[in-house]
Image (cartoon, coloured by chain):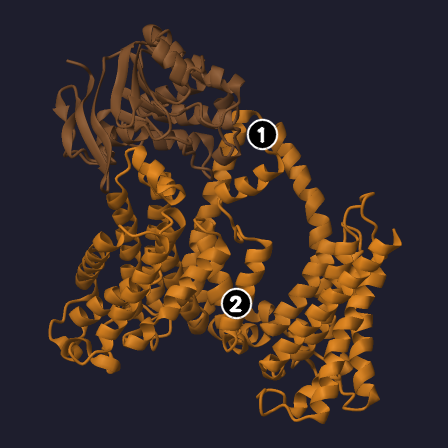
Amino acid sequence: MPRSIQGRLGAAAASGVYGGLALLLAALVGMFEQFAKRPILAPLAGRGEPVTLDLVLLLGGLLVIGYLVARRSAGPDSIAVAKPVPELAAGLAGAAAGLVLALYVLTASRIDLTGILINAKPFLVDFLSLGGGAGPAGLARPVLAGLLLALAGAGLALLPDRWRPGVNRGLMAVVLLGTLQSVLTRQVDWVTQSRRAGGLVAAVVDWVYANKGVAPRGVLAILALALALSVGVRPLRAGLERRFRRLPADQQVRSARLLRGLRVTLLLCLLMWLPLGLGTYPSDVMDTVGIYILMGLGLNIVVGFAGLLDLGYVAFYAIGAYTVAVLTSPASGIGLGFWAALPVALLVSIGFGIVLGIPVLKTHGDYLAIITLGFGEIIRILAISDALKPWLGGARGIQLIPAALRIPLRRFPLVGTMDPQLQQEMYYPILAAVGLALYLAWRLRGSRYGRAWMALREDEEVAEAMGINLVGTKLFAFATGATMAGLGGALFASKVQTIFPASFNLLISINILVLIIVGGMGSIPGVFVGALALVALPELLREFSDFRLLLYGVVLVIMMLNRPEGLWPTAIARRELSSKEAPSA
Amino acid sequence: MALLEVDNVHSYYGNIHALKGVTVSVEAGEVVTLIGANGAGKSTTLKTISGLIRPREGAVRLEGDDLSSVPAHAIVARGLVQVPEGRGILGRLSVQENLEVGAFTRNDKPGIAEDLEMVYTTFPRLRERRRQAGGTLSGGEQQMLAIGRGLMARPRVLLLDEPSMGLAPILVEEIFAIIQRLNRDQATTILLVEQNAKAALEVAHRGYVLETGSIHLQGPARQLLHDPRVMQAYLGA
């Protein structure tokens, strides 16, 4: 059926155009210019300039277009659908993407667009034409580059299944390691300074990285390692599994339990050691991630378990933070210690949760979202208001909040040191709080209240017909969520020691909601995955933080289209998708 | 004293006088059916019994206790358990989770496990599908799940709202056979609200015919089944 093949080629070209437009959009928001400062690949033989992240992203984008189009064309064969040759489709898509970039070059080199588009600078014409400038070379180069790179992508897509995952992971690892060079080398410097054993690590890192970017030998080593791992690990794992199956049943149970215990112990040791081993900046990031996880676990109970869309969750965070601040800061003259103020902060958070909850929880869905949104803003505005200025300090906030924990010993034999200037010890109370919240969330989900929340989320009328007290059950979810946010706020105040109303804006609520959605609604491990992906990564890659909201949007759209159940879905969401394949009679 | 008494109840939807003095009684161990056409007030009667609508006059009594000030969820805890119209399956929860939600008002773990086993014995097909999402069951299976979920609350009186709705005739027969078996083998007291008068009267001990908000006829089910007025209006004879 030649007509259908033509249609498919048209679709491939359209995919290329969309891909090209996406790259152009990234260019016009200034992403490439920003990324030009981050070297990824060192030049061959040490001459010339390193390849920077902007070029990697542009060329990688073209490569990905070819890869995706070729994968789609090379899908499982069926008689009904005729498929074009994957290389042809990919090449067409790549050329189409290149053409979009060429058209921009043509336009921008003749008309000055900077009046409307701030980032449409001459740099961009030069960059997108791959150094070809405004002439014919500048038009030909992007198209040609698109064609060639898409073909390369198609080649990658058509690799046999045995090799492809390894190559893909290797390439991604090269880009990631290149991006993280400054973070990693700083880390290694710090390790070698504080410990003698760091020499070996430093040597490996020095070997992999050139002065700027990953050295060619490092690229080869990373690729080889990724390939060896992915090709070698599978048979090894299958063999182990076969041996495990051959064990008698009671031994299987026992060894599985032993293995789990071992894993948990190792993880705990690692978590305890992290701030000592990583130094100040990464452990600061870990603190932030920890507080987000804590609040994510709380909001997950409210939104994910009970299905109550709360857009003002930041309010409880603010209440926890301000309660601790007022009670402990010398400015107010109360002067409690952190641990004395903490229970009060939690009680106040629960109290506000209930006070807000009683009138609000009789409303449903959209109304609930709007009312909670308003509540979050009210709390922030109260904190900034003149009326409460004598207590809450208005826009200047509250200073000199004491730290929760002081460890007098700074240097630990063999393990590491803590920086006396920074409150690195805060990591431990946060870790403990996350552990507690995790345990609570996990136990609650399996309890009859957990089931009541899920029934409520599915159908309120049925839940009521089953004897579930709607208001009471909702209130319980709301109060539990409020407690976790209050705890997060209290720890935050003690960690940063100075709080302002501006730290408690709507964006915090949105961030937490997004991390839950990305991780998987109602999924407890999903909260951790979401927080690592959306809080830790942008924190480590500072260039990205300007585009954090843009990336959130892109990530959300892609997730909703391709993986609505989240990165680590709950059993329910997984079941829903799998049961669609085999409906019962 | 009857187990459940609906005593001269007047209920309103806003200003609409939906029930005009309905009196129904159910004895322990009975199957009683309430039949009538669309809009006769069958569902309103059930909603009044389960506390979702409060009567302006009259009272609903369980073993002589007036329920008019008891909140709806607490009425379930007292043993008046409704299997809602349209089955009300929690579609994304598994079959077993649906059943566990049914036992929400109880706290006796061994008793709940025992009843779960009882439900699975009564409905073997639910056991086969216990990990499947409730929404993926067929209509008949969903009705079984809804009844099973009602049983998980250990009801004093099980209130069934139109269990035959939307089911193929062969499944309707199966569901009514199950209702009869539940009553016979486990002495479950059942108040059955139905439009399918013939099927309902065949399994019930006694019946009430509801017409525009008041009881029109009542008596032993077999007698109603042969009553010419019932035959003409509801049995298509």
The kind of residue on which mark 2 rests is Gly
Identified by mark 1, the residue type is Ser
Mark 2 neighbour density, 10 Å: few (under 14) some (14–19) many (20 or more): few
Q: Colour of chain B?
A: brown
Structural distance between the alpha carbons of marks 2 and 1: 37 Å
What is the chain identity of the residue bearing mark 1?
A: A
Question: Horizontally, is B114 left or right of B172 in the view?
Answer: left
Residue drawn at (13%, 76%) of the image? A332
Please state the horizontal and vertical placement of residue A280, each as a whole percent of the image. Answer: 42, 73
Query: Which chain is drawn using orange?
Result: A
SS class, disc 1: loop
Residue B202 vertical position relative to residue B47 in the rendered view, above or below: above
Q: Give how far across and how far down residue A430 sits, in percent.
A: 34, 61
In this view, the residue in front, B65 or A324, is B65
Sooner in the amino-acid sequence: mark 2 or mark 1: 2
Give the residue at mark 2. A553
Residue A584 — which label? 1
